[in-house]
Image (cartoon, grey):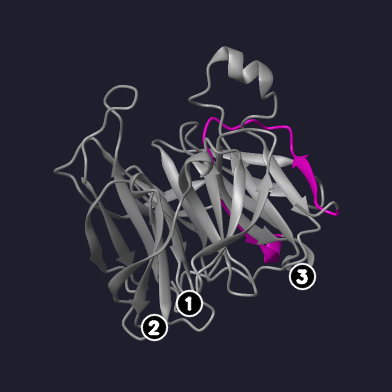
Amino acid sequence: MSSSIRIESVGKEKNRMGECPVWEERENALIYVDINGQKVCRWSAVSHEVQCMSVDARVSSVALRQRGGYVITLGTRFAFLDWDTQKVTTILELEQDKPNNRFNDGKVDPKGRYFAGTMAEETAPGVRARRQGALYTLFPDLSVIKQLDEVDISNGLDWSLDHRTFFHIDSLAYAVHAFSYDVCTGKIACPRLVYHLEEEEQMPDGMCIDAEGKLWVACIDGGRVIRIDPETGKRIQTVRLPTSRITSCCFGGKDYAEMYVTSAYDGLDEATLAKEPQAGEIFKITGLGVKGIPQNFFAA
C-alpha cells in the first residue's frame, strides 16, 4: 500500500449498516444510506455536517435523479425521495409474494436506468433462504424488467467505461461476474467469472469503477477495499481500513480523486466494537493515485 494513502473519518455519525455512497457534485456532498437505521443521509463537504432523513423501511440504495432529488430502494419498493420536502413517493412494489425479501444495492446505468437487486433477510444469525433474490431494472418510463433470478444477495454493480460490460456481485458466490451489456436495451447476458475472493478478503459487498476501468470492491468482514483488473482477473491493490465491516465505496470530491467508503457496526459483538471504535463511520481515502468518474442520473 502506498505511503501517500491517507484514511480519515468524515462526519461523526455512526451507521448500523452504512451503504451505497454516491457523490452528488451539484450539492458538493456525499449521499448514502443506513439500511438498518432506516435513513438516507447527506454529508456536506462544505459544512462537514450530516443531515439524515428517516424512512419507513430498510432503505438499501440511493441514486441521483436528473430532475432533482433521488430515487431509492425501500423495502421491496422503488421510490422517489424529495429531499427538500422529505416526501417519499412509491413508484412500484415488487416481490410481494416474498415477505422476507428486501432490496439491496442499486446503481444507475449509462443511459439513466436504475439497476437494483433483492435478497432474503436472515431468519436467524447466519440463516437465510437461498436463491430468493433477483436483479431488476427500472426504466425512465417507470416500467421494470427482471434481469437475473435465483440470486442469493444481489450486491455491487457497475459498468465498463466502453459501456459493453456490466459487472455484478452475488455476495454468497464470493465473486465478481461480468455480463455482456447492450447499452441500447439495457439487457445483460452471458455471465463470466472475473474474480473470486480469497479467504482473507471475506465477502464482496459494494463496488465501483475507476477512470482506468479497474474495479474497487468493498470486503465486508475483510476490513478492506481491493482493486481488481477485470481484464486479467487479478487483484492489483489492497487498502486496509480501521474497521472490519466495510460495505461499499465510490469516488467523489474535487476531480473525483477521493474515495468514500461506508461501513457498519451491526453484526459486531461488544469485544470487537471495543477494538474497532470507528465501526459504522464513513471514511475518505486520498492519495490513491487514481480518479473515479461521475455518477449517472436516473433519467426521470
Where residue 177 sits, quadrant-wise, is bottom left
User: Which residue is disc 2 drawn over?
Assistant: 183
Q: Residues within 10 Å of mark 1 (few under 14, many from 20)?
A: many
Mark 1 to mark 3: distance in Å?
19 Å
Q: If you read the primary sequence from the N terminus, does the residue marked by circle 2 or circle 3 appear first?
A: 2
- The part of the chain drawn in magenta is 4-27
Q: Residues within 10 Å of mark 3 (few under 14, many from 20)?
A: few
User: Which residue is disc 3 drawn over?
Assistant: 255
Mark 2 to mark 3: distance in Å?
26 Å
Q: Residue at x 38, y 36 (%)?
A: 57
Q: Position of residue 259 (x, y in %)?
A: 69, 56
Count of numbered marks: 3
Q: Residue at x 61, y 32 (%)?
A: 280
Q: Which mark is residue 110?
A: 1
Q: If you read the primary sequence from the N terminus, does the residue marked by circle 1 or circle 3 appear first?
A: 1
Q: Amino acid at mark 2?
A: Val
